[in-house]
Image (cartoon, rainbow, N blue to C red):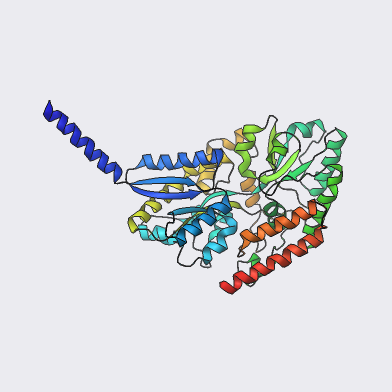
Amino acid sequence: MMKRVGVIAAAAMLYSGLAQAATEIEWWHAMGGSLGEKVEEIAKKFNESQGEYTVKPVYKGNYTETMTAAIAAFRAREQPHIVQVFEVGTASMMAAKGAVYPVHELMADAGEAFDQSAYLPAVISYYTDTDNKLLSLPFNSSTPVLWYNQDLLDKAGIAEVPTTWGGVYHAATKLKEAGHDCAISFGWQSWVMIENMSAWHNLPIGTKANGFEGTDTEFTFNNDTIVGLLQRLRDSMADGTFKYGGRRGESLPLFVTGECAMWMNSSAYYASIQDQAKFRFGQAMLPYSASVVEKPQNSIIGGATLWVLRGHEAPEYKGVARFFKFMSSAEIQADWHQFTGYAPITTAAYELSKEQGWYEKNPGTDTAIKQLSLNTPTPNSKGLRFGNFVQIRDIINEEMEAIWAGQKDARTALNDAKARGDELLRKFEKTN
């Protein structure tokens, strides 16, 4: 009996030693709430699929806070292996010489087969270098859509969801006649109303192909189309047609409580809206100005990718590469897409979702991918790559809020945003 106990104890010690030997991979992310729980679930699935590596997700706050924390950690040589960075931080990450381990290089060094053509062109084009090599791993990519309250539209006798801005204001009149004031609101206002409305109308946000062709660029978003869109929205606040609810996602309650009939923001709010809305809702493509273009071009992505930071041992990066391959599987990507509303970033995930009948059961949930792939991207609609754009977005937000508060007209505010933004572009150019 003693001999048997000794064998069991030895086996337990061996198992314990093996468990402790698992190489830990730290992943800093910006996914809170139910999205954070899904991130934990993905990491758990990977950890349970093998015994060599353990991925440890750590929530570090919103996108800006997570990126700032990673930069500070790198300077202190306490950086994580992986950090989630939103799309407007791309130029800054590319400029961080010696800090970033490009994904294409990581996968090759680790001996892991990796085909970047598996990802949708509208997604990877944002995150490739001048040689079209992938720098960071696409993870959560979304695009703004027009969310609508079907119950309110039906009550107002609006048979079709508006496709143009003229249609939005016509719907506002019908809603008002039915006793409902707020027709529309939006969130992430720079992304939706400046960046995406420019791409949607095939207009440049700035010179040099929106910064892709060099740092010696300047902004051009203070044009008649964008000025006109914002000024008309400001004017409509007087009768309650438009209500402003915050820079990011703070305006979500305006929609899910039924206060505003339509809301423009990320397709990735699907899980939150499904959770909170007590009415029939749907999503449609963004409205466009029919007086500017005959048809819309394509929207651009938001969201974030996973960047790998240097400074760790080679065996640890082998684990990162293995995890990235796991993350790229059709099953993981399709599940993430269906749960969150983020776009299916690989062709395989999109096809799997179709095979599973997801879009038939949930009409409209393919709006994001249809919008992103509506037309072949032009230099105006490929995306943007401006240095210091995290800070520049704050400037744009400040100036847009001056419009909503009645402190400036739209032209003055956007001219001021351009001038202030150009100053930060020149600072970035000098240091890069």
Relative vertical location of residue 338 with respect to residue 135 in this rendering, above or below: above
Residue 11 image offset from top left, x and y in percent: 20, 36
Tell me if I can see residue 245 in this picture: yes
Residue 358 image offset from top left, x and y in percent: 57, 36
Q: Quadrant of the C terminus?
A: bottom right
User: Between residues 144 and 83, which one lies in front from this camera angle?
Assistant: 83
User: Between residues 398 and 379, which one lies in front from this camera angle?
Assistant: 398
Q: Identify the image quadrant of residue 363.
A: top right
Tell me if I can see residue 366 in this picture: no
Q: Is 26 left, or right, of 119 in this rendering?
A: left
Which residue occupies 34% across, 43% down? 50
Residue 242 image offset from top left, x and y in percent: 80, 44
Q: Is 349 left, or right, of 429 in this rendering?
A: left
Q: Identify the image quadrant of residue 407.
A: bottom right
Q: Is 382 left, or right, of 409 in this rendering?
A: left
Residue 341 image offset from top left, x and y in percent: 59, 41
Which residue occupies 81% across, 61% down? 411
Q: Which residue lies furthest to the top in this view?
A: 1
Relative vertical location of residue 320 with respect to residue 157 in this rendering, above or below: below
Q: Is 334 left, or right, of 268 in this rendering?
A: left
